[in-house]
Image: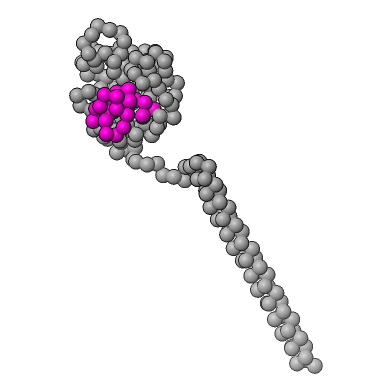
Amino acid sequence: MKSLHKIVAAAMLAVLVLGAAACSGSRNQATAKKSQHSQSSTKKQSYQKKQNGIEDTRTEKPSGSLSKACAKIGVSPNGVKNTALYIESASWIGTNYKYGGMSRSGVDCSGLTNLIYKKVYGKSLSRSSADILNDNCKVIKKSSLREGDLVFFRTDGKKSKTPNHVGIYLKEDKFIHSSSSKGVIISSMTQDYYIRNFIAAGRTGVN
């Protein structure tokens, strides 16, 4: 009789063990299916965004290095508000000057300003220095300059208040522009040449 009780107890224990194992397996399968569904959903959303021309940048690492860009420009990375402006500006340094140019093979001052503004701010500007000042800017004090503002000069020696040269102000008195003699360079607002030929500072409202 005791042997029968032992057999029954053993059988019940086996049933319990098998039931627990089956339950665990079901949970694992459910977890795996949920994970697969999540991955599939993410891939589907990514594909749909690519199909619609939308780029998901939430997990993208920034292209380029702010510290390297600032070192190339000659300013400190501390206090930078728009990383893209400095990385994009640094990438243009050394590009040849070309009157009317709008590409990496050659660019003039207003062309450079347009291209950087379009890439960084998504904003189109007028095509000449004078028109950019008249059409796209609010004139501000020189002492109020901040990154992304525009600086205008008259560089042909004429006594005119109409600018024929434009650059983008960065920080620490530095601005990027395309010089007809040196191509795309970084210059300082404190240089005598630019103090002498300064016409105006303008703000476009993007910064």
Side of 39 where 92 appears, left or right = left
- Quarter of the rendering containing residue 112: top left
Quadrant of image for the C terminus: top left
Depth check: give the residue in front, 135 or 19: 135
Residue 166, horizontal then vertical, whole percent: 31, 20
Side of 8 where 196 appears, left or right = left
At x 43%, y 26%, the residue is: 123
The boundaries of the magenta stretch are 96-117
Residue 89, horizontal then vertical, whole percent: 32, 31
Question: Is residue 80 on the magenta stretch?
Answer: no
Residue 90, horizontal then vertical, whole percent: 30, 34
Outermost residue, right direction? Answer: 1
Outermost residue, left direction? Answer: 181
Outermost residue, top direction? Answer: 159
- How are the residues colored? one colour
Depth check: give the residue in front, 156 or 31: 156
Side of 2 where 72 appears, left or right = left
Tally the numbered discs.
0
Residue 134 in sight: yes
Question: Is residue 106 on the magenta stretch?
Answer: yes
The correct choice, above or below, for 35 with respect to 133 in the image is: below
Depth check: give the residue in front, 60 or 130: 130
At x 36%, y 13%, the residue is: 141
The correct choice, above or below, for 121 with respect to 11 in the image is: above
Residue 145, horizontal then vertical, whole percent: 36, 19
The correct choice, above or below, for 204 with respect to 104 in the image is: above
At x 26%, y 13%, the residue is: 154
Residue 202 in sight: no
